[in-house]
Amino acid sequence: MRRSIQSKVTVVAAAALLALTACTTDPSIENPPAAETEGGEAATTPAEEWFDQEAFDEQSEQRSASFIGDPEQPWLQYLEGEMTDTSEFASEGAKKVCFANASISNPWRQTGWITMNQQLEVLQEQGVISQMETRDAQDDDNTQIADIDYFIAEGDCDAFIISPNSTAAMTPAVERACETGKPVIVFDRGVDTDCATTFIHPIGGFAWGIDTAEFLVDNLEEGDKVVALRILPGVDVLEQRWAAAEKIFQENGIEATDYFTGADPTEIKKIISDELATGDVQGVWMDAGDGAVAAIEAFEDAGKDYPVMTGEDEMSFLRKWEETGLTGLAPVYSNFQWRTPLLAVERIFAGEEVPKEWVLPQTPIPEEERADFLASNEGMPDGHYAKFGGTDLPGYPEVWQERQIP
């Protein structure tokens, strides 16, 4: 028997959080001020408005697809598909890269930014890249549009790298960059144009939602209660994660109640505590790992059995998961993708083909692999991401341990 999904949300002021795809409660990591919250219920955008059956099916298949390239270098792997001929860009000498970044306002982006700069160091030493001029939009669409237009007007960029703050707003600016005739590399989030030389990203939000919801369904019974903790509305990859999970919960008779938390650990604890006060909660689903420890602590405070839970490959969750022995899964939005744009620049100016859509592996960490990732990331701060993919880069491990953010 199917059960309809209830939807209760805590309204969150999202403006300061629009770039979040992952974050942390680690006090050693700098974060923007927490969003203010208001109590009470409010209607959310129905998940079905974000659901795309074709994308759902495609990403579901891609989870088990064979990737081209060395599995020891997943940041260079890709799925078979259309390739871009870059022979027109082939030239010798070091190139200047101009990077328009959405932000480094959360630890997922900070971890990637550190890795990207260590990769840059390698390519500079090899004479591939002369410099990378970077402008940080601090999570603001208008600022990033101005940043891209600045680079275009400056006229001395050999290649553009763009990590969009949002999809629709950034599309015209990306198209203007394409019109310069220089290679354009978009990564992390997409835009509504295919003019870029390559678009680099992990499989996607639907794959995350499928991995996590199927794990919970496999470990729960029909009629069990799941609390879904979502950081904020309106970000496509996050909405897609929930749209996929909600569909699977509905089809398997799981009662799921979703809340927006603003990634606030205090709010997360309150939500879980309130739910436990009204009945048992058998599962916790998260669209990002931040606050996972707070959610687990709420069960401990209430003296309740640990839930079946999905978090993320953030170290704080992996450590708490090991400590408690709960039944868990760490989904991944591959942080190593921050290396790939610079390596794409190397290939493009060598005149080598690159994938038109460069889809990277996105593989969750199951319990049997947790110990290995904990060991390989020993000494890293809680806000670090286990699959950062930088162990072969200069500065490892100290640069990441000390969070040396350029």
Image (cartoon, rainbow, N blue to C red):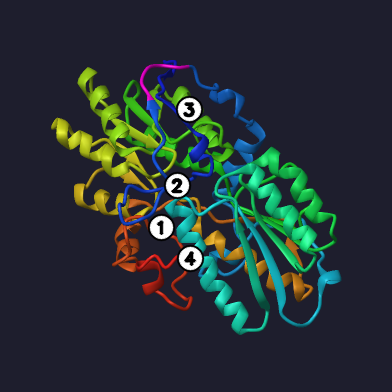
Tell me the SS state at disc 2.
Answer: loop
Residue 22 badge: 2
- For label 4, the residue is 114
Q: For the residues labelled 2 and 1, say whether their Cβ atoms are less than 8 Å apart.
A: yes
What crowding class fits label 1: few (fewer than 14 Cα within 10 Å), some (14-19), or many (20 or more)? Answer: many
What amino acid is labelled 4 in the image?
A: Ile
Distance (Cα) linking label 3 and label 1: 26 Å
Upstream in sequence: badge 3 or badge 1: 3
Residue 397 appears in view: no
Residue 184 appears in view: yes
The quadrant where residue 69 appears: bottom right
Distance (Cα) linking label 2 and label 4: 15 Å
Residue 5 image offset from top left, x and y in percent? 43, 19
Distance (Cα) linking label 3 and label 2: 20 Å
Upstream in sequence: badge 3 or badge 2: 2
What are the residue bounds of the magenta stretch?
38-42
- For label 1, the residue is 385
- Closest to the camera, between mark 2 and mark 4, is 4
Residue 167 badge: none
Tell me the SS state at disc 3.
Answer: helix
What crowding class fits label 4: few (fewer than 14 Cα within 10 Å), some (14-19), or many (20 or more)? Answer: many
**Horizontally, is 30 left or right of 169 in the view?**
left
Residue at point 24%, 43% (across, down): 326
- For label 3, the residue is 246
Residue at point 26%, 33% (across, down): 269
